[in-house]
Image (spheres, rainbow, N blue to C red):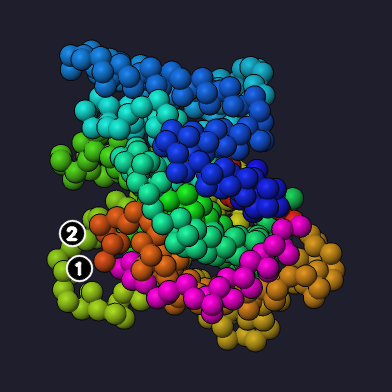
Amino acid sequence: MLFNSYVFIFIFLPIVLLGFLLLRNKTPLLPIGWVALASLFYYSWWKPQFLLLLLGSITINLIFGKILIDGRLSRTLSRVVLTFGIIFNLGVLAYFKYAGFLVANVNEIFGTGLSMPNILLPIGISFITFQKIAFLVDAHRGLARNFTILNYIFFVTFFPQLIAGPIVHHSEIMPQLEAALRRDFKADFAVGISIFIVGLFKKVVIADSLAIYADAGYAMVKAGHPIDTASAWITVIAYALQLYYDFSAYSDMAVGLGRIFGFRLPLNFYSPYKASSIIDFWRRWHITLSRFLRDYLYIPLGGNRHSTLRRYFNLAIVMLLGGLWHGANWTFAVWGGVHGLLLGLNHAWRQLPFTRHRFYHSAPVRMIAIVFTFLLVTLAWIPFRAETIGEARIMLAHLFPFNGGPLGLESFTHFWKAQFTHRGSFENWFKPHELWPAVLSPDYLSTVARPVGILLAVNLLVIFLMPNTSQIFGNFRPVLGTEAHRHTLRGALQRLDARAAFVLAFLFVLSVLGLSHISPFLYFQF
């Protein structure tokens, strides 16, 4: 059941909200239990059999958690219980997500003929696994509080964040359980539904429009058809923007839904394409994933407490595993490895003396850094989107067609000079002539799709010049902001008045009109 579907918006959400309203003035067990039960139903909507897997996993983790919290174990025995708990959770994740990947690689390396397991990946398993592991680690450390069976079930299954995050920490949700029932429902509903509508508009109207061009370009590469350089650049930029708006949309909708029920979810997406470095990018993109990898992998590995070389090695390992967390494919490993390398280079760059000069932190240099970071991230998305490493290499070759020669400075300069000095070549950026007709109907661009050049330009301007959702609604404290971003959560919107309601109603109507074609969120695949 997708957030961007008729059944969710007009049936599931109203029923769950009505039950919550009728029960919220009763004992806290009833409204919390009602929402937890609705969340389990929500999870079972796609494949009911996976509900048994989720309930079984929750039960076993409850047992581990109870032993760690109430068992009065010695430090050594507690560590043993924790180890078994982590092995169990990672084992479930490995079986469903990586068994086929492992068999395929064993067959490739050793020439064996092992049969490929036909295993369907349960949705949200990557996110749920990390949340449960974090809870067990904190239980071992003596940091898990407000622990009851119902609280734990609610923390794991709360449907706004169940499928694609944010990766919620128990210390963020459990303390809110009783406070949420005492909040002003009308105010929370107004803020929550407003943010939800903004996210719905981003997904249905913007992200899905950009998907037309991104999917078409990669479909051409997969089919082995050549595309011109302009079309290749439009494809990779369109995908970078599609992924940005798609994940931003889900993050907004999750935050909005949580707020409707009186809960503030953690900040998970904060204008990552405004980042001035790769380090800054990972403080803005999937913030809760970065937090988990830092607290439960990077720091236990030693973090930056050892030598510089060891620090860079730890970064590389963390990003490589973070890449594989996104999917069982070497393309994700390459993507994670690229970001690990870029992070290492970024940290090394910051150690150079001139980076502390005042000029280095001036506005012009920062603008150049933002554009350069955006280009690096956009190019790194190629293996993330491509289905094979070979397809990623082909797309890169289309981006830089130097007749098979080396990517030297002279050929690089000559190519880009040609793009911006020859009128016919530049026009290809707005009317790519090889990509679209082979994939789309001949009249598609004139009847359905937006003009691609205008579409990309407008969305880039919005990304770089407009405040993000957390900033627009900053006065209403929509999220649990991190210390790194708290001072910038300014409220561009002073109050939710009739004018704001009119704009939001207009966005909602446009979004609903686009729901005839329902597409899943990209992070549902991970």
Q: Residue furthest front?
A: 26
Q: Is residue 188 above or below residue 302?
A: below
**Residue shown at 56% from the left, 48% from the top:** 17
Q: CA distance from mark 2 to mark 1?
A: 7 Å
Amino acid type, callout 1: Thr
Q: How many marks?
A: 2
**Residue shown at 31% from the left, 74% from the top:** 366
Q: Secondary structure at mark 2?
A: loop
With 189 as the anchor, is 66 left or right in this view? left
Quarter occupied by the N terminus? top right
Residue 425 horizontal/vertical position (percent) = 65, 80
With 334 as the anchor, is 447 left or right in this view? right
Q: Is residue 364 above or below residue 24?
A: below
| Mark 1 crowdedness (10 Å alpha carbons): few <14, some 14-19, many ≥20 | few
Amino acid type, callout 2: Gln
Q: In the rendered structure, which segment of residues is drawn in magenta? A: 488-516
- Are the residues tagged 2 and 1 within 8 Å (C-beta)? yes
Q: Secondary structure at mark 1?
A: helix
Does the magenta segment cover residue 492?
yes
Residue 142 horizontal/vertical position (percent) = 21, 28
Residue 355, labelled with which disc? 1
Quarter of the image where one finds residue 452: bottom right
**Residue shown at 32% from the left, 19% from the top:** 66
Residue position marked by numbered label 2 in the rendering: 351
Q: Is residue 398 at least partly visible in the picture?
A: no
Q: Is residue 480 above or below residue 401?
A: above
* Depth order, front residue of 33/441: 33
Q: Is residue 202 at least partly visible in the picture?
A: yes
* Depth order, front residue of 22/331: 22
Residue 420 horizontal/vertical position (percent) = 56, 83
**Residue shown at 61% from the left, 34% from the top:** 41
